[in-house]
Amino acid sequence: MELKHVSELVGAGKDIESAYWELVVKDIQDTCKLLEPIYNETDGEDGHVSLAVSPKLANDTKGTIEAAKWLHNMVGSPCVYMKIPATDESISSMKEVISLGISVNATLIFCLPKYEAVIDAYLDGLESCGMTDLSKVSSAAAFYISRVDVTLDKKLEQIGTAEALDLKGKGAVAQAVLAYQLYQKKFSGPRWERLENRGAKKQRLMWASTNVKNPSYPDTFYVNSVIGPDTISTFLVQALQAFMDHGILSRTLDAKVSEAQDMYNAIEKLGIDWSSVGSELEHEVLDSFTKSFDNVLECMQKKAMSIYSFQKHV
Ligand SMILES: O=C(CO)[C@@H](O)[C@H](O)[C@H](O)[C@H](O)COP(=O)(O)O
């Protein structure tokens, strides 16, 4: 299929959102073709492409399931991950989507209780999947890092005691270290082994938001601090360049677990509720995703209309 211009799609009677999805699906199909060799070489472990369902469906369980099924079918590649945010409503949809054999990037995870719910949705989904070989279904859980510190650091500054100020810049990594412990616990033992015997793949932890937002922290701080087996790091270009230049490749993620637990507890003792921090961030980021989505549609509409009316007048 040739990539059509938005004005052609709108001229052919498509509404702007349908035109958007047509362009996005084509783009994702092309990217899947590029990554399919990696997907095949690694037996489906790597080489995935994420396609996000509309952020407007974040609180709509059924709508998310339908959108994921439709988009997965439209793309038609095993490489595609349906990217679904970890809101309470969407976590319910993840179980159903996984049970249909559709791979999922569970995104916008900011706290441990949400992360555990995401893992459970994956395990429940695999258990109720009718396929005998589960090896074609996979998932990544995108746990955010730097944004957590931005929110925590503000709260610690407001508390303002020496103990609080000393914990600045430590919470996000401490929470990530504990997330990795949870990953190891949940993906071991009899429940997991039963699924593994059916070919199931572990849901890998994917570190999102790894770029440093506070300029007083070293630019490789987050990437250096969350290195461990079976995890995925995402990078913005600057963070990748910084890591390639002076990053330290060493297994940090489970090197200081009890220290991380102490920091996590100390932050809680100061009256900071980790789940509330998570919900605050979830709302903030979803809101920004929705604004960006609306903005893209608005720009496409303007572009389509200007080209369409120009063509009508020549
Ligand atoms: O969405 C995912 C994973 O699902 C991430 O890769 C995500 O795109 C990026 O890490 C973030 O958007 C960048 O993080 P931030 O700087 O906006 O906090």
Image: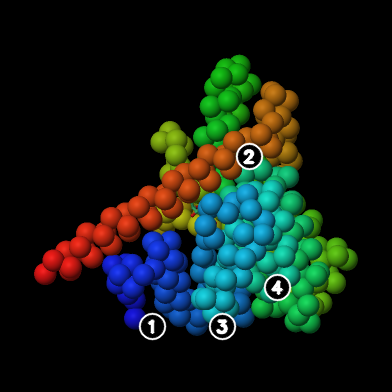
Per the image, the residue denoted by label 1 is 1
Locate residue 210 relative to residue 299 in the image: left or right. Answer: right
User: Does label 1 point to a residue whose CB lies under 8 Å from ligand 1?
Assistant: no
Q: Quadrant of the C terminus?
A: bottom left
**Count of numbered circles on the image:** 4
Q: Residues within 10 Å of mark 2 (few under 14, many from 20)?
A: many
Percent x, y of residue 258: 74, 41
Identify which residue, 259 or 110, lies in the foreground.
110
Q: Can you tell which of label 2 and label 3 is closer to the viewer?
A: 2
Mark 4 sits on what residue?
Answer: 100
Q: Is residue 258 above or below residue 197?
A: above
- What kind of element bears circle 3? helix
User: What is the C-alpha distance between the residues marked 3 and 1?
Assistant: 23 Å
Amino acid identity at mark 2:
Gly
Is 93 in front, or is 6?
Answer: 6
Residue type highlighted by circle 4: Leu
Mark found first going from the N terminus, 4 or 3: 3
In which image quadrant can residue 216 be found? Answer: top left
Distance from Cα at disc 1 to Cα at disc 4: 27 Å
State the separation of the CA atoms marked 4 and 3: 21 Å
Residue 88 at least partly seen: yes
Classify mark 1: helix, strand or loop. Answer: loop
- Quarter of the view holding residue 23: bottom left
Q: Secondary structure at mark 4?
A: loop
Mark 2 vs mark 1, CA separation in Å: 42 Å
Give coordinates of residue 312: x percent, y percent.
Answer: 18, 68
Per the image, the residue denoted by label 2 is 278
**Residue beneath the point at 58% across and 24% down:** 156
